[in-house]
Image: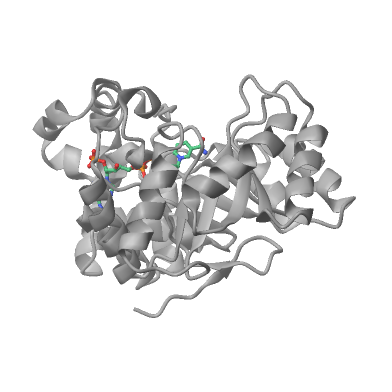
Amino acid sequence: MTTNFRPLGPTDIRISPIGLGTWQFSQNSIAAAGNWAVIDQDAVNAIVQTALDSGLTWFDTAEIYGFGRSERALARALLTAGVTPGQVVIATKWWPIPRCAGSIRRTIDKRIKNLAPYPVDLHQAHWPRSLSSIESVMDAMADLAEAGKIRAVGVSNYNAEQMRRAHARLAKRGIPLASNQVKYNLLDRSIEQNGVLEAAAELGITIIAYSPLEMGLLTGKFHADPGLLDSRPWRRRRKLKERLHITLPLIDRMAELAAQYDATITQIGLNWLINAHGPRVVAIPGATKPRHAADAAGAMRFVLSPDELAELDRIARSLTAYQPISN
Ligand SMILES: NC(=O)c1ccc[n+]([C@@H]2O[C@H](COP(=O)([O-])OP(=O)(O)OC[C@H]3O[C@@H](n4cnc5c(N)ncnc54)[C@H](OP(=O)(O)O)[C@@H]3O)[C@@H](O)[C@H]2O)c1
């Protein structure tokens, strides 16, 4: 597969339009919060190997995912796969609640140790809420960038105004804001309405779309076989079950397009995400099985036509009673 790499905001980092999310590697039920079953290291190794073989060049993890377990599992899997440092891009996140910006400086060595020998390419403030101002948080991130401990700075779940503040503060140090990681998919269009997508375009920032499959709803597998939900952890089971019926018209049309492109419903949803706004948006689907990573990567091998992108947009918007899932 030939991958068209995309810039990560105004940085020199290049990434595939799709990366792998690793909340699923949290390895304990508290951090996975009733959403994901435990995946052991062998399974993580297999998922990461398939992701690499399929052309995914970057991975998103976080301090809070299993309190470091996801970071360590990812590094072990990359080592097992024989990946050398610098060969892939790694994004992680600092957990801000209830902490001060100083903890960004105090916890970076732990992030580096967990991910060793792979460097932290992108460090993100996981949420805007912390005991410090956004300016102090960005000052701490800038310190790490200047010290060479991280390559780029990103934020997550920031609104448009918070993005602008983060961007302006980093600019004082000559450091670009690379990205804002936010929930975005065909069924959750908040960032199109709340100014985040517009601000990202204006500031040259990449949008990293999380929950790009609406936690599995946009794969269509639960519509085809609702009984599958019985084996999923309780919180996610409840969230998905009540949303099956209302989303069926969209899934039906996605299935038709999938047949036309010799693709899957998952690939149609991801394809829309990475093409509806040009290279501005990249996506990080999570995987619990190796075939999920291969399926996700397959979304990079074709491009839906402008008419098809618009039609999916229209059908998704027509589901006005749909309430997006909150993590
Ligand atoms: N910054 C933040 O605040 C934030 C919040 C949430 C997530 N994230 C990031 O975004 C990533 C992805 O989001 P997400 O975990 O919420 O969910 P998602 O990517 O929308 O859905 C992932 C789940 O869907 C199922 N799935 C994936 N690919 C599939 C396929 N091809 N066929 C069938 N089923 C498939 C799997 O679950 P089953 O096998 O169990 O069905 C998988 O765990 C996370 O891993 C994390 O890195 C960030």
Task: Tell me if residue 80 can be seen.
Answer: yes
Note whether 287 is above or below 187 in the view shown. below
Q: For this rendering, which residue is in front, 275 or 316?
A: 275
Name which quarter of the figure residue 125 lies in: top right
Q: Quadrant of the C terminus?
A: top left
Answer with left or right where residue 106 lies relative to residue 260.
Answer: right
Does 239 sit above or below residue 8? above
Q: Nearer the viewer, residue 202 or 206?
A: 206
Determine whether, in the image, residue 179 is placed left or right of residue 23.
right
Residue drawn at x 33%, y 40% is 24
Looking at the picture, how far across and down is residue 59, in whole percent? 45, 55
Residue 186 visible in the picture: no
Give 36 or 304, whichever is nearer the viewer. Answer: 36
Q: Residue at x 63, y 42 (%)?
A: 108
Q: Quadrant of the N terminus?
A: bottom left
Residue 155 percent location from the top left of the image = 65, 42
Quadrant of the rendered image holding ligand 1: top left
Q: Residue furthest bottom?
A: 2
Q: Is residue 280 left or right of residue 138?
A: left
The residue at 10%/38% (across/down) is 225
Q: Is residue 128 left or right of residue 21?
A: right
